[in-house]
Amino acid sequence: MSRVFNFSAGPAVLPEPVLERARAELSDWHGHGMSVMEMSHRGRDFTAIAEQAEADLRRLLGVPDDYAVLFVQGGASQQFAMVPLNLLPEGGSADYLDTGTWSDKAIEEGARFGRINVVASSRDTRYTTIPAREGWQLDPQAAYVHYTPNETIVGVEFPYVPEVGDRPLVADMSSTILSRPIDVRRFGLIYAGAQKNIGPAGLTVVIVRRELLGRARAQCPTMLDYAVFAKHGSMYNTPPTFGWYLAGLIFEWLLAQGGLPAMAEKNARKAGRLYAYLDGSGFYRNPVDPACRSWMNVPFRLADESLDAVFLKEAEAAGLVGLAGHRIVGGMRASLYNAMPEAGVEALIAFLQDFVQRRG
């Protein structure tokens, strides 16, 4: 079977050259007679893989030396607990922005560990907007400010990095990391589940200002303490070695594409092309305020929603998969992560046009 265009929100499409290279190296990495999955994580060979991956990620994002880069087991949802366990002192409070399902889950988990101040919420617009900055109620005593730059389910995205004064800004960048350049110094901590723009599920990257390490609560489990990961090079125990290796291949691939400036241009073109067609179609609609539409996740609905099942079945037959919207909101969703080629977006638009002609 030939490769399909996979528009899933995650686990998501991976670059085909990376998959081909991993396949070639799967059973015999560089003539060593074994797979990366079989190597000792403390051996010289895997240590070199891990160090190169971190160096390439630092180069891509311009990560300063005073930030630690951690490769952590689990997904971003685990960070909903790790962040307050490490940064929220007993009896303290933290500020959170509520702009969608994932920020809401982070708020719910954070409330298990301390007082959470919801700075602002767009719940009343069904999360189709970003709350106006002038209405935010920031707490000057907050330990940190948490936000989700991109909400994958509703497809809403911050068009800017919030200014929060001297409080550490914490960002769940699972769905936007590596899609464009960022200024890491604007953040105290960034975390990102791998299964969108970094690699396979089961790995999370954390970038944290070193001065924030060592603040974990006494009851914080050892394996949830950022300082432990930093001290041991993310190898306090056996890390997800194959995921780390694949992430390194993707970092290398991104550098070969021209880095994040080149990816930003490509991603802007992909999203702009799809939104332009949806807005002008008269049959499909996107509910998100155009000022804060996501580059990465484009939800849309059909004018006749009784055709949803037919649409998905025919799209899959045409080699376009993963287009069903999240179960919470329904409809359709096309995720356009870094590895989605522009040809995939063109194929989707061609199918959308054909479906309207036949079914609209």
Image (cartoon, rainbow, N blue to C red):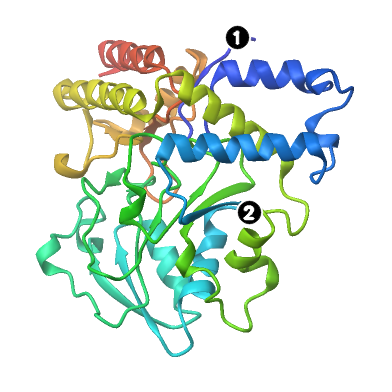
Label 2 CA crowd tier, 10 Å (few <14, some 14–19, many 20+): some
Observer-nearest of 213 and 175: 213
Residue 213 percent across, percent down from the top left: 52, 68
Residue 52 percent across, percent down from the top left: 62, 34
Kindly tell me whether residue 198 is visible in this rendering: no
User: In screen coordinates, is 230 left or right of 193?
Assistant: right
User: In screen coordinates, is 171 left or right of 242?
Assistant: left
View extreme (front): residue: 65
Residue matched to label 2:
74
Residue matched to label 1:
2
Q: Identity of the amino acid at label 1?
A: Ser
Q: Identity of the amino acid at label 2?
A: Gly
Which disc is residue 249 wearing? none
Residue 315 percent across, percent down from the top left: 44, 19
Separation (CA) of disc 1 from disc 2: 31 Å
Kindly tell me whether residue 241 is visible in this rendering: yes
Who's the residue at 35% across and 57% down the image? 187
Q: Which SS class for mark 2?
A: loop
- Name the quarter where the C terminus is drawn: top left
Task: Return the disc, 1 or 2, that comes first in the chain's sequence.
Answer: 1
- Name the quarter where the N terminus is drawn: top right
Residue 122 percent across, percent down from the top left: 22, 61
User: In screen coordinates, is 164 left or right of 61?
Assistant: left
Observer-nearest of 174 and 263: 263
View extreme (left): residue: 134
Quarter-of-image position of residue 61: top left
